[in-house]
Amino acid sequence: EDQVTQSPEALRLQEGESSSLNCSYTVSGLRGLFWYRQDPGKGPEFLFTLYSAGEEKEKERLKATLTKKESFLHITAPKPEDSATYLCAGIGGSQGNLIFGKGTKLSVKP
Amino acid sequence: NAGVMQNPRHLVRRRGQEARLRCSPMKGHSHVYWYRQLPEEGLKFMVYLQKENIIDESGMPKERFSAEFPKEGPSILRIQQVVRGDSAAYFCASSPPDGTGELFFGEGSRLTVL
């Protein structure tokens, strides 16, 4: 069964303290690995798509990377406004829908 | 360019009533997906539709739940005879026809069953 697992479930950082969020996946024929940000009471907001191992994408303080088994979301010098739940999702060769992990809830304290 | 529009944002129903949730995809998007999110749980896929067609309903409960995406008008997720366990946030997403897999989500409809 295809699965996406995120760790840690929650992460508390001080402002400026860099860290990484992990997303491990077992998705047959992975066609894409996606990262979303979700704020409380809001819908997920698209961040990145990664298509092949070795690929990297950056946006402001965020950088997403992909290997054959996992993806990382690196957060450099985070600010309090980066506090949110970060969701990882994969789509496989035979599917039309994304399979989501449960997310990592990030809190950045000033 | 308007995003994915969902309404109502909040809906309260008593047990046994019906709930109808509506979703208008982004302009130019022809694929619609419905997901359910329970507190502390991830987004769970329910159904994937194109205009007038259900492509994949493998995540839909067998009873009481139905979805449609008519030729004209929004997609509708219908829950009949609601129970307390149906209380959740229901998210609609749409994607362009290019098949990249990127989904763009609405703000969700939060259903509370009393």
Image (spheres, rainbow, N blue to C red):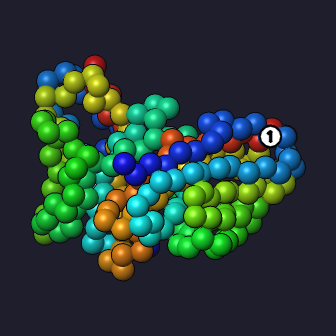
In the figure, is residue A60 to the left or right of B26? right
Residue type at numbered disc 1:
Leu
Q: Secondary structure at mark 1?
A: strand
Name the residue located 20 percent from the left edge and 52 percent from the top edge: B57
Label 1: how many Cα within 10 Å (few below 14, some 14–19, many 20+): some
The residue at which mark 1 appears reads as A13
Name the residue located 71 percent from the left edge and 38 percent from the top edge: A11
Name the residue located 80 percent from the left edge and 40 percent from the top edge: A13
In the figure, is residue A26 to the left or right of B14? right
Chain of the residue where label 1 is placed in the rendered structure:
A
Q: Is residue B12 above or below residue B108?
A: above
**Is residue A58 something that shows in the picture?**
yes
Image quarter of the N terminus of chain B: bottom left
Name the residue located 68 percent from the left edge and 49 percent from the top edge: A21
Who is closer to the viewer here, B58 or B68?
A: B58
Quadrant in the rendering for residue B84: top left
Residue B114 percent coordinates (x, y): 28, 19
Who is closer to the viewer here, B19 or B85?
A: B85
Which residue lies most toward the right here?
Answer: A16
Quadrant in the rendering for residue A31: bottom left
Who is closer to the viewer here, A61 or A6?
A: A6
In the figure, is residue A26 to the left or right of B8? right
Residue B3 percent coordinates (x, y): 42, 64
